[in-house]
Image (cartoon, rainbow, N blue to C red):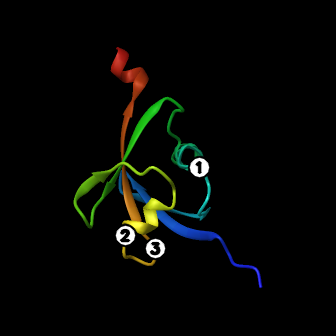
Amino acid sequence: PTHDQSRVITFEYKKHEKSFKVHRKLPYENLLHVVKINFGLPDDAAVVLFDPVANCSIAPLATTDLWAWNDSEIPKYRLIVRSETNKRK
């Protein structure tokens, strides 16, 4: 039997939610890249994940941490974004 290594996760940005089916072993930086593209964010945007349940920002080492740190069946994280190009102006 094949074990499905993917899980669903939801991200919210400016009150818009999008769900993603993600392989648990996908490198975290690759996940952020996909999320930025889907929300129309620039590649150089600095993204921090905020866990509304725990009421804190998180800094995962790996994509699997996003499920390990959240008891929800489908964890949801809010995106906090700062564009690097805006910072330089």
Q: Quadrant of residue 65?
A: bottom left
Which mark is drawn over residue 74? Answer: 3
State the residue in front, 65 or 42: 65
Label 1 vs 3, first from the N-terminus: 1
Query: Which mark lies nearer to you, 2 or 3?
Result: 2
Quarter of the image with the C terminus is top left
Q: Which residue is mark 2?
A: 70
Quarter of the image with the N terminus is bottom right
Circle 3 SS class:
loop
Residue 15 in percent (x, y) is at 36, 57
Q: Is residue 21 above or below residue 14?
A: below
Label 1 vs 2, first from the N-terminus: 1
| Marks 1,2: beta carbons within 8 A | no
Residue farthest top in this picture: 89
Residue 85 in percent (x, y) is at 42, 21
Q: Amino acid at mark 1?
A: Pro
Query: Is residue 16 visible to us here?
Result: yes
Q: Quadrant of residue 71?
A: bottom left
Find the distance from the CA under tag 1 to the CA under tag 3. 19 Å
Residue 67 in percent (x, y) is at 45, 67
Q: Is residue 53 above or below residue 49?
A: below
Q: Which residue is mark 1?
A: 27
Q: Amino acid at mark 3?
A: Ile
